[in-house]
Image (cartoon, rainbow, N blue to C red):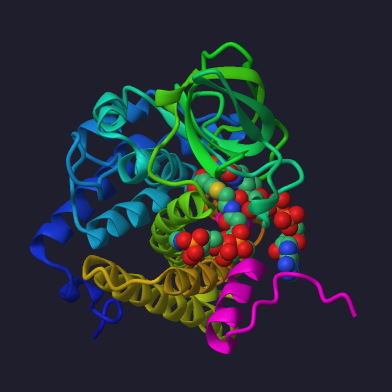
Amino acid sequence: MPSATDFLDIDSLLSDEEKLLRETVRKFTEDQILPDVAEWWEQGTFPHELSKEMGAMGLLGMHLEGYGCAGTSAVAYGLACLELEAGDSGTRSFVSVQGSLAMFPIWKFGSEEQKEQWLPQMAAGEVIGCFGLTEPDSGSDPASMRTNARRDGSDWVLNGTKMWITNGNVADIAVIWARTDGGVRGFIVPTDSPGFKANEIHRKASLRASITSELVLEDVRLPDDFVLPGVSSMRGPLSCLSEARYGILWGVMGAARACYESALEYAKSRQQFNSPIAGFQLTQQKLVDMMVAVSRGTLLALHLGRLKDEHRLSPEQVSFGKLDNVRNALEVARTARSILGANGITLEYPVIRHMTNLETVYTYEGTNEIHTLILGQAITGIPSFHASKG
Ligand code: TGC
Ligand code: FAD
């Protein structure tokens, strides 16, 4: 009989090394995240001191080669994201931002000196990074950004505001994308630079175990060696997004699995009308739908991961995974919430926390609509991001 938690025997598609890594990260989540995460979530905080432990485990920039990074396969990185997000989307976000959004641009577009200066410390979790692309008036359309950098002698001077920036208040450096006379450039901005300010965003009802900030840059002056030399167009930030979206398409299956397993266990023990609620056909339909969604999404993630390891994964295929896995994970979480009844609304169970977190994941890294339009363009050849003027 297939197992209720790995119905398709997806385990058999993983190597021993991949399974070992997954078990290590799962244990980290069980020991270091799950006991306290509801408390962090309630208090709206994330203990960023965990970064050193994550660094020691090789989780930060783990799919990058060299400079103190673990250099694992894309599938191994994905499995780590899944296990971290089975704890909380905020934990996976911390790792995504550090590895895929702050370290990746330095690794991909930085000078040798920049890589040697920053990457080993970031891989060790001693330096925390954040990624500033979104602005108050530029969300889905980041190319409309207003943040700008102008030359002043051999220096750069940056002005602008970035919004919704994960880790902004705990970061030591911010990778800031800004408009220049020569196109969009990325800057490594130490957060103690004069003129740089991070304001924490409070009263979030989602992704609460994660720090989110507004970044204000007022005449922040940087020497020339703080600009990333390797890119001067939107390709820079957008290629970082592809890396982070890849982690998300795996990660959300962790959140979905946690919701499904919680609902399955609850349904087998909760009695109403003198029988376990798992015995009602309507509940079984929900459980089966969740199990099928989690199995299918995990298989999709693994397929995309194998393509990535063969250097054959396109940004549009990443959009496919982000679109479908996030919307399915959200649906699984909502269904699980209903099975838990009133208990489903408390933080005593992980479900409502995952459910509300997934509302953020549905929006960040390209909304559900934006990924739909990316796929629409891919299959028709016709872009439809701009409203018709007709
Ligand atoms: P477009 O003209 O389409 O492209 C400009 C250049 O970029 C290239 N490109 C990509 N490269 C790699 N990966 C991708 N996903 C790429 N998408 C585009 C493209 O080939 C072109 O290259 P070149 O060399 O020809 O110049 O650019 P556009 O400005 O028209 O953008 C289109 C659109 C709407 C798809 C894009 O703006 C988009 O994806 N918008 C969504 C914005 C978004 O996802 N923001 C996320 C902010 S970061 C975040 O949310 C972090 S959450 C952190 C956490 O996990 O906690
Ligand atoms: P908008 O772009 O204003 O969109 C609003 C609605 O309009 C959405 O439903 C959208 O899909 C829809 N819409 C927009 N354009 C179209 C269109 N052409 N066709 C159809 N529908 C459309 N950003 C960073 O740079 N770095 C970070 O670290 C970061 N972390 C984040 C953490 C959190 C907790 C959150 C909530 C966001 C974070 N973001 C970050 C920002 C995130 O990427 C943006 O919120 C996201 O890109 C959407 O932008 P917006 O919120 O401005 O929505």
Q: Is residue 380 left or right of residue 32?
A: right
Quadrant for the C terminus in the image: bottom right
* Up/down of 190 relative to 86, above or below: above
At a point 40% along the width and 27% down the height, the residue shown is 128
At a point 40% along the width and 53% down the height, the residue shown is 86
At a point 44% along the width and 24% down the height, the residue shown is 224
Q: Is residue 232 left or right of residue 29?
A: right
Q: Residue furthest front?
A: 153
Task: Tally the numbered discs.
Answer: 0
Asked whether 73 falls inside the magenta stretch, the response is no
Q: Residue furthest right?
A: 390
In the image shown, does 381 or 67 lie closer to the viewer?
381
* Up/down of 211 relative to 90, above or below: above
In the image shown, does 290 or 167 lie closer to the viewer?
167
Q: Which residues are magenta?
A: 361-390
Q: Residue furthest left?
A: 16
Asked whether 374 falls inside the magenta stretch, the response is yes
Q: Residue furthest top?
A: 194
Residue 327 visible in the shown view: yes
Quadrant for the N terminus in the image: bottom left
Residue 48 visible in the shown view: no
Q: Position of residue 167 (x, y in %)?
A: 52, 32
Q: Position of residue 51 (x, y in %)?
A: 34, 29
Q: Position of residue 233 (x, y in %)?
A: 52, 51
In the image shown, does 159 or 361 lie closer to the viewer?
159
* Up/down of 239 relative to 303, above or below: above
Q: Position of residue 57 (x, y in %)?
A: 21, 37
- The image quadrant that residue 145 belongs to is top right
